[in-house]
Image (spheres, rainbow, N blue to C red):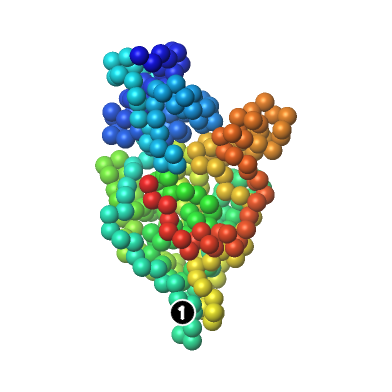
Amino acid sequence: MPEFTPTQGRYLACIRTYTEDFGMPPAESEIAAAIGVSPPSVNQMMKTLENKRLIRRQPGVPRSIEILVAPETIPKWKGKRITSTMKVWMRVDPPPARDTSRAGDRKTNVYRFKITLQETTPVIWRRIETMDVPLGKLHELIQTALGWTNSHLHRFRIAGRDFTDPRFMTDDIDDFAEDYSGMRVSDLVASHGSNLRISYEYDFGDSWQHEIVLEEVTESQPGVRYPRCIDGERACPPEDVGGVDGFADFIDAITNPGHDEHEEMLEWSGPYDPSSFDATIATRRMSRALPVW
């Protein structure tokens, strides 16, 4: 029978309790919140539990933790109440066909937006151009232009009202958000004009807040493919880094080889250049399918 330390047993108890309560394994950020440690510490513990053959995970697949020890050997969870920050969904219908044609003689509106990740210093931002798209597609463009991975919930706030994907509309979400099906960028511009401002929150745990500003409505240019990212600055934060405060601590550690947590953060995230940004790479991501967990 595999043996584990009390600390390892606490992690196993957390994983088992979460899985039983929510019907799926937890994300590392949720384990970190429940136990009160940093996400990199959880990442290290997951590797230890795997090496001891106490759990197994599918490489590259989030929320795939499987406990390999008998349930009766795992202690009861004695920590704080465990909560979930995500509802997993899978695309059950084929995604809408993309219009990959180049703009020809027929002119159509192109919407230029500036997306700014709030409370980051220096500021992380992107400038994108897109033809008229549904709000769900705008979500995809924000995710791919910034560099997020669509691993968490999101919502838009427009004129004091919150909107989200109907596949997230569960009892704990539909109290504060409405279905955005059928809403398009052109509808919002028609209602709010050139003063259109949209708030976009991603990951209700880390609570990344974005400001989306409509800068201009122009006509499509011959030979130009949309959507595209035309400008921006700085790299997207890693997923599950702990929000704005956790990101600041991460930057301090990852950019300073003498920092006590430098090696730990480097192993957790891999090489990370906070100043890195390439509009061509962002545009390429925008043209591909959004990651779906």
Residue neighbourhood size for the residue with mark 1, other residues' Cα within 10 Å, grouped as few (<14), some (14–19), many (≥20): some
Residue carrying label 1: 108
* Left or right: where 180 falls relative to 48: left
Q: Nearer the viewer, residue 96 or 1?
A: 1
User: Residue 175, image x and y in percent?
Assistant: 30, 45
User: Residue 9, image x and y in percent?
Assistant: 40, 17
* Left or right: where 135 falls relative to 143: left
Q: Is residue 187 visible?
A: yes
Q: Nearer the viewer, residue 41 or 232?
A: 41
Q: Nearer the viewer, residue 239 or 118?
A: 239
* Left or right: where 20 falls relative to 130: left
Position of 153 relative to 57 (above/below): below
Q: Quadrant of the N terminus?
A: top left
As drawn, the residue found furthest toward the right would be: 258
Position of 56 relative to 108 (above/below): above
In the picture, residue 171 is in which quadrant? top left
As drawn, the residue found furthest toward the bottom would be: 105
